[in-house]
Structures are given as structure tokens and as C-alpha cells.
Image (cartoon, coloured by chain):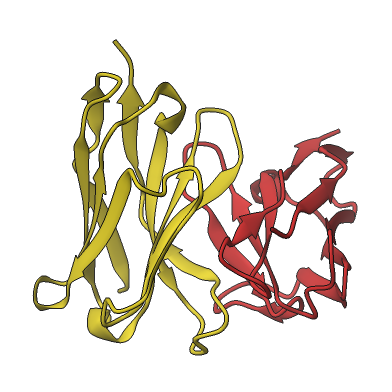
Amino acid sequence: DVQLEESGGGLVQPGGSLSLSCTASGFSFSSYDMNWVRQAPGKGLEWVSYISNGGSTIYYADSVKGRFTISRDNAKNSLYLQMNSLRAEDTAIYYCVRDASVYFDFCWFDPWGQGALVTVSS
Amino acid sequence: EIVMTQSPATLSVSPGERATLSCRASQSISSHLAWYQQKPGQAPRLLIYDASTRATGIPAKFSGSGSGTEFTLTISSLQSEDFAVYYCQQYNNWPPLTFGGGTKVEIK
């Protein structure tokens, strides 16, 4: 069964840092590109970051560029998101999602993890 | 950045009826569109990709159509488990990958 499980969410003060992890199981993690997608409370979905299967290609949304860092460890079947200089507007559920497309040029999301809640507040 | 616009924001439908949801792209995205369903307290679930291809395990009651800038998700004979929020997402021109604002399908 393909599964993604996030961990590391919590409460952090504005300007602080937090690291999220995602552990994958049930598929060949090293063969798939991965993403983080977030959802603010009561709001829609926002793509955050992408990393290719080998880690050589990385993209970020403008809203997090320079503050967030995506990485992966294929030996540990794990995806990470290091979040620095956090702001109130970063408060959201962060989902770890697999790129289900077999084509490099395209990217849709399946499956999704259950999400990790990050709250930025003083 | 390609902007995705979904309409209506809320759709009230009686059980057993059909729901038609719209998604418009700010420029042509060919058929590079996905649809997701999200129920309260749950993560989104992929329904459709390439505008009209159902994902694994998705029943035939869900159908997608369209190309270019105009897309439609049709849900036939709505049941209680189909009342949820639906999002479209484009992957023709990225980064960034962009979503529509969502359509909430509620019981009439």
C-alpha cells in the first residue's frame, strides 16, 4: 500500500524555524519526484516546492523562496522541508505528495500524506 | 503564472442529481489539468488527470472534459459521499503549479 507520513509539525514563533519530514512506503521512493503542498486553515491548496527523484532539480513557490529548503534522502525513503524565517501566513497544513506523472514536464499529485499542521504564532 | 478560476464557489445539489463544476485557465494549458476531491478533515484525493483520465479506483460517475482554457468536472447521481470540495490544478506551464480556489458541492 502506497503511503506517505509527515511528521515535525507544531507551534513556532514568528521568525523561527521548523523542519518537516515525510516517510514513504509501499513504492520505490527513489524513482519518483516529490512535492510539498500546503493549505491554510479554511483556504485552498498552494503548491510549495518540488524536488526531482535524484534531487538535482528543485523549485519553490515565490512565497517561500529563500526561506524554505526541500531535500530528500533516498536511502531513508524520506522527504524533508526546512522552514526558516517563518511568518504568520505560513500557518497551514503541509502535505507531502508524490508526483504521479511519469513525464518530467508534467506533475500531478497522488497520493497525499495526511498532513502536518504548522502554526506560526507568538 | 497561470491563474486557475473555478466556478461556482458553492454548488447546491440534491442527492441523485448531477453536478457540473467549471475550471478556467488564464491561458491555454492543453489538456494538462487534474481534479481533486477533498472531504472535511481529509487530505485531497486525485480524481482525474490529463483532463479526462480517471485515476486508479475512481468510479465512472466522475468524468472530466475540456481542453485549452475551459474544463468541466461532472459528477453523476450524487451520493452523500460525493459532497466535498473539488479543486482543479494545471501542470502545463510550471513552476509554479497552480490550483483553482475550489468548488464546494453541498447538499441542497
Camera-side residue of B24 and A70: A70
- What is the residue that sits farthest to the top in this orientation? A122
Q: Is residue B57 above or below residue A80?
A: below
Task: Name which residue lies at 85% across and 52% down.
Answer: B16
Camera-side residue of B93 and B62: B93
Camera-side residue of B106 and A78: A78
- What is the residue that sits farthest to the left in this orientation? A75
Q: Position of residue A10 (x, y in %)?
A: 23, 29
Q: Position of residue A100 (x, y in %)?
A: 48, 78
Side (left or right) of B92 relative to A53: right
Q: Is residue A84 above or below residue A82?
A: above
Instruction: State which quadrant residue B29 falls in.
Output: bottom right
Colour applied to chain A: yellow
Colour applied to chain B: red
Camera-side residue of B58 and A67: A67
Side (left or right) of A78 relative to B98: left
Q: Is residue A83 above or below residue B1?
A: above
Side (left or right) of B85 relative to A115: right
Task: Name which residue lies at 87% across and 75% down.
Answer: B68
Q: Position of residue A79 (x, y in %)?
A: 23, 63
Q: Quadrant of the C terminus of chain B?
A: top right
Task: Name which residue lies at 29% across and 10% down.
Answer: A122
